[in-house]
Amino acid sequence: MTTWLKSTHSDETGGQCVELAALPHAVAVRDSKAPDAGHLALTRRAFADLLARAKQDSLPR
């Protein structure tokens, strides 16, 4: 069974939430408002790169 963890930056009303799960060789990301819609699996390196770019606010808009 996969254990999903909600972001600590998610608000208490359920808006704009993401959840993460550690998979054997990846990190899974899903929308907590639509958990049955699927998830995105990223390698640990790709997830670290995504997180770094998000923190630097350098993601394309």
Image (cartoon, rainbow, N blue to C red):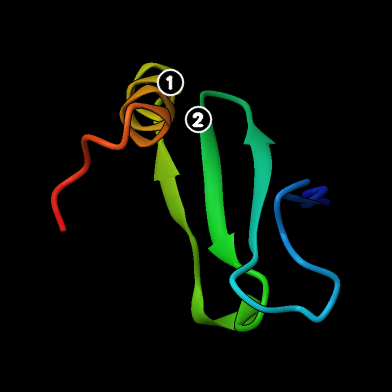
| Quarter of the figure with the C terminus | bottom left
Can you say whether 3 is above or below 46 in the image?
below
- The picture places residue 16, in percent across and down from the top left corner, at 59, 71
Front position among marks 1 and 2: 1
The image's mark for residue 57 is none
- The picture places residue 22, in percent across and down from the top left corner, at 67, 33
Q: How many labels, in total?
A: 2
What residue is disc 1 on?
48
Number of residues whose C-alpha sits closer than 10 Å to that of mark 1, classed few (under 14), some (14–19) or many (20 or more): few
- The picture places residue 59, in percent across and down from the top left corner, at 21, 42
Number of residues whose C-alpha sits closer than 10 Å to that of mark 2, classed few (under 14), some (14–19) or many (20 or more): some
In the displayed structure image, the side of residue 27 where residue 9 appears, left or right: right
Can you say whether 37 is above or below 44 in the image?
below
- The picture places residue 52, in percent across and down from the top left corner, at 39, 22
Dot 1 amino acid type: Ala
Q: Which type of secondary structure does the marked residue at label 2 adopt?
A: strand
Going by the picture, which residue comes out furthest to the front? 57
C-alpha distance separating marks 1 and 2: 11 Å
Q: Residue at x 51, y 81 (%)?
A: 37
- Which quadrant of the figure has residue 33? bottom right
Dot 2 amino acid type: Ala
Q: Which type of secondary structure does the marked residue at label 1 adopt?
A: helix
Can you say whether 34 is above or below 53 in the image?
below
Which is nearer the eye, 26 or 54? 54
Which is nearer the eye, 53 or 42? 53
The image's mark for residue 26 is 2
- Which quadrant of the figure has residue 6? bottom right
Going by the picture, which residue comes out furthest to the top? 45
Q: Residue at x 52, y 23 (%)?
A: 25
Mark earlier in primary sequence (1, 2): 2
